[in-house]
Amino acid sequence: MKNIFKRGISGFIYVVLTVGCILISKYTFFAYFAIILTYTLYEFYRLCKVGGNKPQVWLGIIASVYLFVAFFLYDLKLIGEIIFLGIIPVLMISPVIELFRNSERPVQNIAYTLLGIAYIAFPFSVLNFIISPYELHPELYVPEALLGLFIILWANDSGAYLVGSLWGKTKLLEKISPNKSWEGALGGAFFAIVISVFIFQYVGFMSPVHSIILSLLTVIAGTIGDLTESMFKRSFKVKDSGSIMPGHGGLLDRFDSMLFAAPIYFIYISLFLN
C-alpha cells in the first residue's frame, strides 16, 4: 500500500509538471525537456557502465543538448539547417578521446556514447517539431499536438496495466518483460484509441480515422520502446534505470516508450496534418 501511495504521488507530480510546462509556453517546454533529456541520458550511460564499459558521459550530454537546442532554434526559424553541421565535429571527438583514455574497451565506449545520443537525444529533439507541427506556419505553438502523444502513451500504459492485471495470461515477450501480456497490450491499445479519438475530436486536431491510425502506430512504437529498454536493463542485469521517481524507477523507465513513439508520431502528423 505504501509503495502504491508513493507511485501515485510521484506519477501525479510527473503528469502535472509535464502538462504544465507544455501548456505554459514553448520556453517552459524547452527548459523542462532539456533537463529531462540530460538526466535520462545520464541514467542510460550509468546503466552502460555495468560490466566495465566507460561511455563518454560529458561528450554525450554536450552533443545531446546541442542537438536539442539545434532542433529548437531551427523550429523557431532563428537559424537554418547549417546548425546541424555543428554536431559532426562534436561526434568526431569521441574516437580522439578514446585515444588518450587507454581503455580496454574503446570501441564499446564509443558505441555506447553514440548510441545514447541516437537513442535518447534524437527522440527528445523531435518533440520540438511535434509542438509546432504546421510546416507552413512554424510560428504556431500547438501544445495539444505534443500532449496528444503523451495522452496516448499514458492511456496505453494505464489500460495495459489494468487489463493485464485482470485478464493477462498470454505472455508478450516473457524473456524480455515477463509481466507484459497480449491481453494487456490489446487492452492498452483500445484505451489509447478511445481516449485519443475523443480528445482529438474535442480540440479539433485530427479526424477520427486519423486519430485511430495515429494512436495504433504510437502504441505499437511505444510498446517496442518499452520492450527495448527492458532488453537493455535485462542485459545489464538491473531492475530500474534509477530511483528518482519513487514507485516508477528512473526517468528512462518513464520515457522509454516515448523514445520510439515520438519519431513515428511526428512522421504521421507531418504527412497528414499539414
Image (cartoon, rainbow, N blue to C red):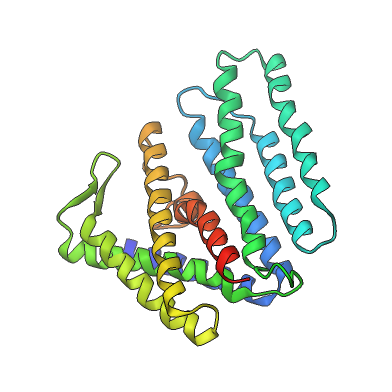
Quadrant in the picture for the N terminus: bottom left
Q: Is residue 190 left or right of residue 90?
A: left
Left or right, 266 with reference to 176: right
Where's residue 205, x and y in %? 55, 79
Q: Residue at x 83, y 53 (%)?
A: 80
Residue 119 lies in what quarter of the image?
top right
Question: Which quadrant of the figure has residue 102?
Answer: top right
Q: Quadrant of the C terminus?
A: bottom right
Residue 198, above or below 131: below
Q: Residue at x 28, y 59 (%)?
A: 185
Residue located at (37% from left, 39% from top): 231
Residue 47 showing in the rendered view: yes
Q: Residue at x 51, y 51 (%)?
A: 259
Return the residue nearer the eye: 239 or 154: 154
Residue 116: horizontal and vertical position, in percent? 57, 38
Q: Pick whichever, 201 or 68, lies toward us.
A: 201
User: Horizontally, is 257 left or right of 177 in the view?
Assistant: right
Taking the image as drawn, is residue 1 in sight?
Answer: no
Q: Is residue 17 above or below residue 248?
A: below
Q: Position of residue 124 (x, y in %)?
A: 60, 54
Quadrant position of residue 4: bottom left
Q: Please state the total of marks drawn on the protein image.
A: 0
In the rendering, at what x and y percent does residue 204 appear?
A: 54, 84
